[in-house]
């Protein structure tokens, strides 16, 4: 692989140079061959599972790779922690893909670093498999996300509540710059480092804003807001609950990052929370836009001293951007929900229709994915239409009436709805079953089968139906845990 390590060329207080801690008996568990092709992993490596296991466990460092653990801080559940950093991850370096796009290649679970605090630097197989499957599913759903290239089992045991098989997961991301990276330097009053980080982030993620001399802070903030809104709107579209939207898990690239306690919402209920540690429901499904708004405010705070030495003057400049967030989100949300309902153009008055449909889902405890899938199918099937009429009652009539107002054939509406409503999502009970089987058998067969279905979430393949049914208990007692 051709590494080109731009982050490593920043000043050395952005990271610690540190090598992965070798593992006993690495074995390749999951390999993402299409991503490997995109990243131009050389054939002699990608066809040699022993070499892959050595490489993506961290036992063998490829030429050109300069492993580092990056420094960051972050607000966790609202409290500021001035130093977090990669406590169990090593950034091997960056590679350019077939299209010239730059990707970070990072090992997670690759041993302790100076940021580990009390942690063991390791990762269990279950969370590694979860991250691989969830991120592949999200990518196929069209949601911006980090990817996974590999999961390698280590032959070692990690101790959590019980002894578990250990693994290293290779994460591929547009970058690992987080809001928490800015907070790390802001908390230390290091304006020079903040400026460097702004320039670096703009070059890497917002090259259209690149200019000689002055950094264009307001356009930068504006674009960051745009990306984060797009991200959360996409989460809402597919029913994704991140579970731990701390500022250190908010990537400047606008990708979903850190699949710890994440889950998919089954029965539509805006207050859904699955994470065992989120007792206050801070990161509930419906709170995600407001939390992102809050996270962005933390990001903007970091930039205030760079925008104007007079804090009040700086605040006057950024305030309108922060205040606009909710309105901007609402607009994008309406467009997205409109498309889920087959509306080519959404009007202000459609808000009522959207709200009544969603209320009906809540009241009747209907499954989010199934309902929108059936609504899509109802355009082409009289019996499904009548079934949905029974479920949604007058909302269904309202919806039908609204559809007749637009100049579009049922086929066109169907096509629009199909693109926005998946037929299959990585449901919690399926994920759990697959993870358990992987842990018990030490084999990835079931994960591969699930992945094949999840990679075509808008089409019914032969095996799709095995993964469509909602859980019999409505995910009532479902709980997720941080992958630590
Ligand atoms: P996360 O909850 O995965 O977003 O991680 C929050 C912080 O805890 C980051 O600084 C991680 O590097 C660190 N961390 C999580 N798990 C471990 C572990 N097993 N060993 C060392 N550090 C960890
Ligand atoms: Mg994290």
Image: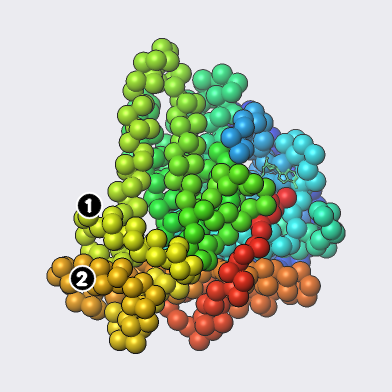
275 horizontally vs 287: left or right: right
Q: Which mark is residue 461?
A: none
Q: Which residue is mark 2?
A: 401
Which residue is denoted by mark 1 in the rendering? Answer: 348
**Mark 2 nearby-residue class (10 Å; few <14, some 14–19, many ≥20):** few
**Is the residue indicated by label 1 positioned so its CB lies within 8 Å of ligand 2?**
no
Q: Quadrant of the N terminus?
A: bottom right
**Is residue 352 at all visible to an observer of this figure?**
yes
Residue 109: x and y in percent read 73, 52
> How are the residues colored?
rainbow
Label 1 to label 2, Cα distance in Å? 16 Å
Q: Position of residue 291 (x, y in %)?
A: 49, 41
Q: Residues within 10 Å of mark 1 (few under 14, many from 20)?
A: few
Residue visible at 51% across and 21% down in the picture = 192
> Dot 1 lies on which element?
loop
Front residue of this view, candidates 263 and 362: 362
């Amino acid at each position: 692989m051709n590494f080109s390590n731009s982050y490593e060329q920043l000043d050395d207080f952005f990271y610690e140079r540190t090598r992965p801690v070798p593992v006993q008996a690495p074995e390749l568990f999951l390999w993402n061959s299409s991503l490997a092709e995109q990243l131009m992993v050389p054939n002699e490596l990608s066809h040699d599972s022993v070499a892959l296991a050595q490489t993506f466990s961290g036992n063998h460092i490829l030429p050109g790779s300069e492993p580092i653990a990056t420094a960051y801080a972050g607000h966790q559940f609202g409290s500021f922690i001035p130093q977090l950093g990669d406590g169990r991850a090593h950034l091997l370096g960056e590679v350019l893909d077939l299209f010239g796009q730059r990707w970070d290649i990072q090992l997670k679970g690759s041993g302790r670093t100076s940021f580990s605090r009390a942690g063991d630097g390791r990762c269990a197989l279950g969370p590694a498999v979860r991250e691989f499957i969830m991120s592949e599913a999200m990518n196929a759903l069209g949601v911006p996300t980090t990817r996974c290239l590999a999961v390698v089992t280590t032959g070692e045991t990690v101790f959590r509540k019980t002894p578990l098989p250990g693994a290293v997961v290779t994460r591929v991301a547009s970058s690992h710059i987080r809001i928490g990276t800015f907070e790390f330097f802001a908390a230390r009053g290091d304006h020079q480092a903040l400026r460097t980080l702004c320039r670096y982030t703009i070059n890497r993620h917002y090259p259209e804003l690149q200019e000689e001399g002055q950094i264009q802070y307001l356009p930068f903030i504006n674009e960051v807001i745009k990306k984060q809104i797009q991200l959360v709107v996409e989460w809402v579209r597919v029913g994704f609950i991140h579970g731990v939207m701390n500022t250190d898990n908010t990537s400047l690239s606008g990708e979903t990052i850190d699949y710890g306690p994440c889950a998919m919402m089954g029965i539509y209920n805006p207050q859904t929370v699955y994470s065992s540690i989120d007792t206050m429901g801070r990161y509930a499904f419906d709170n995600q836009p407001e939390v992102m708004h809050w996270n962005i405010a933390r990001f903007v705070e970091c930039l205030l001293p760079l925008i104007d030495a007079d804090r009040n003057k700086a605040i006057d400049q950024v305030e309108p951007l922060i205040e606009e967030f909710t309105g901007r989100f609402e607009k994008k949300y309406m467009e997205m929900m409109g498309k889920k309902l087959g509306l080519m153009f959404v009007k202000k008055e459609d808000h009522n229709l959207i709200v009544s449909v969603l209320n009906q889902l809540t009241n009747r405890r209907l499954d989010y994915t199934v309902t929108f899938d059936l609504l899509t199918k109802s355009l082409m099937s009289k019996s499904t239409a009548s079934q949905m009429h029974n479920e949604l009652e007058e909302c269904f009539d309202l919806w039908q009436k609204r559809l007749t107002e637009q100049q579009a054939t049922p086929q066109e509406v169907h096509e629009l709805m199909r693109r926005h409503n998946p037929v299959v999502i990585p449901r919690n009970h399926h994920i759990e079953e697959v993870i358990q089987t992987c842990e018990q058998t030490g084999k990835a067969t079931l994960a591969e089968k699930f992945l094949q279905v999840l990679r075509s979430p808008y089409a019914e393949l032969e095996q799709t139906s095995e993964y469509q049914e909602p859980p019999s208990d409505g995910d009532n007692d479902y709980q997720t845990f941080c992958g630590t």
